[in-house]
């Protein structure tokens, strides 16, 4: 007979956003890895609890979910030659640097990205890793170990590039792989690491980089493999007008037509960026249930445009948020990303249509839907106990009145506590078990060495 699960009451928070309609102003009761019950204002738990945490200084939200990132890029933040470049020249400038990545580089870059995300209230992250130069063939294996060591959840995507410069693509030949290698390694990773069901910690998805870096054959074969093994699909699409032009020249199709032609227009797919869709394409994406990861900061940084997030969502396409690569953001802070999405979408749709709560829902329940999950993203009985707690004690919050709105409008940056699956991973603003100064030292040294090898 299993031992009874230890219960915790997060009592009387200063503010709470559960993503659910139930009154939870009296807090949450956590038992094991799940939310046991929500407590209404002035109420008590329905049964005795083992521990009470006074949350009266804290605003509680579901753990933020990052749906698009490139962890390895934390090593090339704010690199001067591409600071003011747009997407295609930015990529051409950096591909040669990234081709020199080593397994140790990737370990440190992944640790830095996940640690920064965790400190910002993020509990689940999707990474799009598509670079496998010589010596880095087991890059996803490296990332799995880092995710497990930090106690987070992740959707790690086995990315790919097969269309090199000599074939009309953007990547240098040293960074591309043949189709057989890509597909066989995708099969291996699914078998080795993909967890199914509620509470999954590590999941594998398949993610050709973009229409301008893989062949149509790889796109179709990847879609077939994903359907056969029941995993999700991810790629960049419609990020820039240059990409639209590329698809027309290479395939004679607009981006969504191309997506459909290779078997990707489905509810198995989530797309990074999705900026340059017309009305008919938005309707088609919504009808198919194809999700979009809105990357507000990256889109501003590279001057790519403003995604039509509200229209996509209203058409039926799940909308989540992503910080994107740390060389096009140049950070991995999810609570700041929610603020950026709030403000950028208000430029398009107005303040009344894009509330702080809507932006938080994109980063939680919407992001969960994009990753194909229904066990995370809201704080409701039976859901996973993934949550972030922020204090409003800093000067920036002085004079604020609505605690949930203040997180975004006053610019929260760092969570005080973060729980993943009922276990505290951040306490008093520090990651449990991680020597952060040591990580910064090793990560900074690796970043310098990577650029030195390139030069």
Image: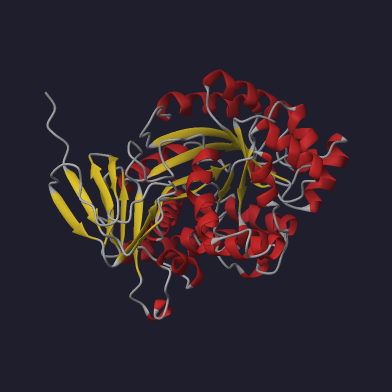
**Nearer to me, 89 or 310:** 310
Taking the spot 48% from the left edge, 39% from the top edge, the residue there is 156
The x and y percentages for residue 270 are 61, 38
The x and y percentages for residue 450 are 52, 59
Give left or right: position of 373 versus 279. left
Where, quadrant-wise, is the C terminus in this rendering? bottom right
**Nearer to me, 272 or 362:** 362
**Nearer to me, 266 or 241:** 266
Q: Is residue 306 above or below residue 249?
A: below
Is residue 402 visible from the viewing direction of this image?
yes
Give left or right: position of 234 versus 442. right
Residue farthest to the top?
A: 228
Colouring:
secondary structure
Dividing the picture into quarters, in which one does residue 196 lie? top left
**Nearer to me, 437 or 34:** 34
Where, quadrant-wise, is the N terminus in this rendering? top left
Is residue 328 visible from the viewing direction of this image?
no
Taking the spot 19% from the left edge, 42% from the top edge, the residue there is 46
The x and y percentages for residue 352 are 62, 62
The x and y percentages for residue 33 are 27, 39
Taking the spot 23% from the left edge, 39% from the top edge, the residue there is 32
Dividing the picture into quarters, in which one does residue 328 lie? bottom right
Q: Is residue 402 above or below residue 50?
A: below
Q: Is residue 189 above or below residue 201?
A: above
Count of picture labels? 0
Taking the spot 58% from the left edge, 68% from the top edge, the residue there is 78
């Amino acid at each position: 007979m299993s031992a009874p699960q230890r219960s915790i009451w997060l009592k009387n928070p200063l503010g709470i956003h559960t993503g659910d309609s139930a009154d939870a102003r009296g807090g949450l009761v956590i038992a094991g890895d799940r939310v046991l019950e929500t407590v209404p204002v002035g109420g008590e738990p329905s049964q005795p609890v083992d521990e009470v945490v006074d949350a009266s200084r804290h605003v509680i939200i579901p753990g933020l979910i990052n749906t698009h990132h490139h962890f390895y890029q934390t090593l090339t933040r704010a690199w001067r030659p591409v600071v003011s470049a747009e997407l295609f020249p930015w990529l051409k400038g950096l591909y040669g640097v990234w081709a020199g990545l080593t397994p140790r580089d990737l370990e440190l870059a992944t640790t830095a990205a996940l640690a920064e995300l965790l400190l910002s209230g993020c509990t689940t992250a999707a990474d799009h890793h598509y670079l496998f130069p010589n010596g880095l063939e087991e890059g996803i294996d490296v990332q799995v170990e880092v995710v497990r060591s930090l106690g987070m959840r992740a959707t790690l995507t086995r990315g790919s590039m097969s269309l090199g410069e000599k074939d009309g693509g953007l990547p240098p030949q040293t960074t591309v792989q043949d189709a057989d290698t890509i597909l066989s390694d995708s099969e291996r990773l699914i078998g080795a690491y993909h967890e199914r069901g509620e509470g999954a910690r590590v999941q594998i998805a398949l993610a050709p980089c973009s229409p301008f870096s893989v062949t149509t054959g790889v796109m179709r074969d990847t879609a077939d493999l994903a359907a056969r093994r029941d995993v999700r699909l991810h790629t960049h699409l419609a990020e820039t007008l240059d990409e639209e032009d590329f698809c027309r020249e290479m395939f004679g199709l607009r981006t969504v037509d191309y997506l459909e032609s290779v078997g990707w227009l489905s509810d198995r797919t989530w797309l990074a960026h999705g900026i340059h869709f017309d009305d008919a394409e938005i309707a088609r994406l919504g009808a198919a249930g194809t999700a979009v990861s809105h990357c507000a900061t990256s889109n501003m940084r590279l001057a790519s445009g403003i995604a039509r997030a509200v229209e996509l969502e209203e058409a039926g396409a799940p909308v989540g948020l992503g910080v994107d690569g740390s060389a096009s953001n140049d950070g991995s802070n999810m609570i700041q990303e929610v603020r950026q999405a709030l403000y950028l979408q208000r430029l398009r749709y107005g303040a009344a249509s894009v509330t702080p709560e809507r932006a938080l829902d994109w980063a939680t329940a919407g992001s969960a839907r994009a990753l194909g999950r229904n066990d995370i993203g809201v704080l409701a009985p039976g859901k996973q106990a993934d949550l972030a707690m922020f204090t409003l004690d800093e000067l920036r919050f002085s004079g604020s009145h609505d605690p949930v709105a203040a997180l975004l409008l006053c610019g929260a940056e760092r969570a005080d506590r973060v729980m993943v699956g009922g276990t505290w991973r951040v306490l008093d603003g520090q990651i449990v078990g991680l020597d952060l100064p040591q990580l910064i030292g090793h990560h900074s040294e690796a970043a310098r060495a990577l650029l030195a090898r390139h030069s």
